[in-house]
């Protein structure tokens, strides 16, 4: 397991952003784990998270010149990532969107830097993929291309068909996804840190049932 992947999972466990039990997802599936980056709510935590994102992006080799964070969770993520990249001598503009068009002040739907030509979308996870596709449409409407989607966790499970939403995004839109961690990494982490057998078995059973 990559060091930045292990660090993300350690961080998520410390802040209870990664928890175990029984959780009903939007899909109606009962998941034995839940991942919520919103639980990382301290300056030190978000800085550490940004380091994990930045390292994963660097290792990916994706060529980009701009960052985009979809409202709402993507906004603090893209801001923290841009700051971390600047500390690594890569100063990149970032942009985010509003949920509603503002009709006063500066107006408009987008806030921040003008989009570059190759944009990385920064988010936490991709579930159905609806929000990501809306972001893609918004970016393309500005005349820019999407270089990649950068997320914290690839759940590695089937979406509306036999493919995962990430596979659908690659097949349908030609957009790669860079994930800091995956479900397989969570299982490896659980084994390494010696989680109880019932928890580990339930995660593996979920992967066997819904995994790709």
Image: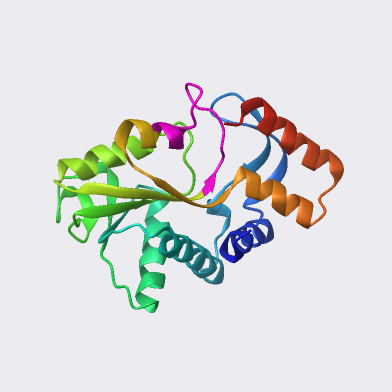
Image colouring: rainbow
Which quadrant of the view contains residue 93? bottom left
In this rendering, the answer to whether 91 lies above or below 208 is below
Left or right: residue 153 compared with residue 83: right
Q: Let me know if residue 85 appears in the view.
A: yes
x, y percent for residue 15: 64, 59
Q: Let me know if residue 130 appears in the view.
A: no
In this rendering, the answer to whether 102 lies above or below 201 is below
x, y percent for residue 18: 65, 50
Query: What residue lies at 63% left-to-right and 42% top-to-bottom?
Result: 34
Residue 8 drawn in magenta: no
x, y percent for residue 63: 30, 59
Which quadrant of the view contains residue 172? top left
Q: How many marks?
A: 0
Quarter in which the C terminus is drawn: top right
Question: Main SS type for the magenta part?
Answer: loop
Which quadrant of the view contains residue 24? top right
What range of the chain is rendered magenta?
Answer: 153-168
Query: What residue lies at 48% left-to-right and 49% top-to-bottom?
Result: 124
């Amino acid at each position: 397991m990559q060091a930045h992947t292990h660090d993300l999972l350690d961080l998520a466990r410390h802040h209870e952003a990664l928890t175990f039990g029984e959780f009903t997802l939007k899909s109606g599936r009962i998941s034995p784990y839940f991942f919520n980056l919103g639980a990382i709510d301290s300056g030190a935590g978000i800085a550490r998270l940004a380091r994990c994102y930045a390292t994963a992006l660097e290792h990916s080799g994706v060529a980009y010149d701009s960052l985009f964070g979809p409202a709402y969770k993507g906004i603090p993520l893209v801001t923290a990532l841009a700051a971390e990249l600047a500390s690594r001598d890569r100063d990149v503009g970032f942009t985010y969107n509003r949920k509603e068009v503002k009709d006063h002040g500066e107006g408009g739907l987008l806030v921040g830097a003008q989009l570059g030509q190759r944009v990385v979308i920064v988010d936490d996870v991709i579930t159905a993929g609806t929000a990501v596709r809306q972001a893609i449409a918004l970016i393309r409407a500005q005349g820019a291309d999407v270089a990649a989607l950068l997320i914290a966790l690839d759940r590695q499970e089937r979406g509306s068909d036999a493919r995962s939403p990430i596979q659908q995004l690659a097949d349908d839109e030609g957009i790669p996804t860079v994930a800091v961690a995956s479900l397989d990494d969570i299982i490896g982490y659980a084994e390494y840190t010696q989680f109880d057998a019932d928890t580990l078995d339930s995660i593996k059973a979920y992967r066997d049932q819904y995994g790709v």
